Amino acid sequence: MMRDIYVLDLHTHTYASGHAYNTMNEMALAAKEKGLKLLGITDHAPAMTGSASLLHFLNLKVARREKYGLPLLLGTEVNIVDHEGKLDLPDSVLAEMDVVIASLHIRCIQPGTVEENTNAYLGAMRHHRVHIIGHPDDVRYPVDYEKLVRAAGEHGVMIELNNSSLSPKSFRKNAKEADIQILELCREYEVPVIVGSDAHTEEDILNFQYADALLQEVAFPVELIANTSVEKVREMLHKR
């Protein structure tokens, strides 16, 4: 059973991502009804097929950061588009985002060697507007996890434990083995993880079923799970 310790979910998508199925209002209302204290909406950046344009992110300044009494963080899941860590939104736009997740996606960059994939993540982390590395458990992109976790600790970046990766429906196969390695390294180096639903529908907001089961299985320290405290997450975002 999923523990009642989670107060926020920062990895969710709306219609603007092109392959998600609810509006911002619907996502916020669902999050409020589920008892969340903070919701992040992080739609896919332009390199993803069918996703929002640059103008969408430029204009997020007009959107309210509170709906139905629920605080919102509006940002993006940017795509890492080369093995140097280049992102598909300029720094001037990233500077206006409340939260930025950087991820590797097959539609945006083909897998490279372990060194190339690791360099892609490390380069993304050097962008001081990047707060979270999204689903680094995609084994199609082999990575030196020790280098990844140590760099995250040095840069103050959170590593995501993505619930969607662990779902039986996921196209990111064999993620559990990768996640166990990542969690053990995060424990060793005391690097916080943030659980993300990666919700593409309102029903999946705060769906951490598989991620929480794994955290319990490996007895991961609760104090290293960022989702347990709004204040902790806001502090880490501010430091970046």
Image (tube, grey):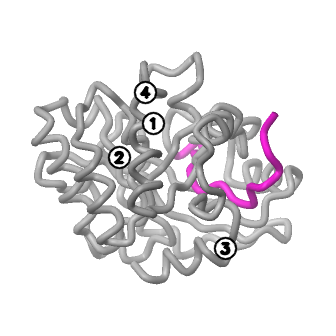
How dense is the environment of label 3, judged by Cα within 10 Å: few (below 14), some, or many (20 and up)? some
* Front label number (3 vs 1): 1
Number of numbered discs: 4
* Front label number (1 vs 2): 1
Give the vertical position of 44 relative to 234 (above or below).
Answer: above
Q: Along the polypeptide, which appears first: circle 3 or circle 2?
A: 3
Q: Is residue 234 within the magenta segment? A: no
The disc at residue 123 is none
Residue that mark 3 sits on: 65
The disc at residue 179 is 1
Q: What is the spatial separation of the Cα atoms under label 4 and label 1, in whole angstroms?
A: 5 Å
Residue that mark 4 sits on: 177
Q: Residue, x 61% and y 37% (percent of image)?
A: 211
Side (left or right) of 86 relative to 150: left
> At label 1, which amino acid type do we have?
Asp
Q: Is there a contact, CB below 8 Å, between mark 4 and mark 3?
A: no
User: Which residue is nearer to you in this view: 4 or 84?
Assistant: 4
- Where residue 91 appears, x then y in whole percent? 27, 72
- Where residue 198 appears, x then y in whole percent? 57, 41
Q: Quadrant of the C terminus?
A: bottom left
Give the residues in magenta: 1-16
Classify mark 3: helix, strand or loop. loop
Q: What is the spatial separation of the Cα atoms under label 1 and label 2, in whole angstroms?
A: 15 Å
> At label 3, which amino acid type do we have?
Arg
Side (left or right) of 205 relative to 46: right
Q: Quadrant of the N terminus?
A: top right
* Front label number (4 vs 2): 4
Residue that mark 2 sits on: 103
How dense is the environment of label 4, judged by Cα within 10 Å: few (below 14), some, or many (20 and up)? few
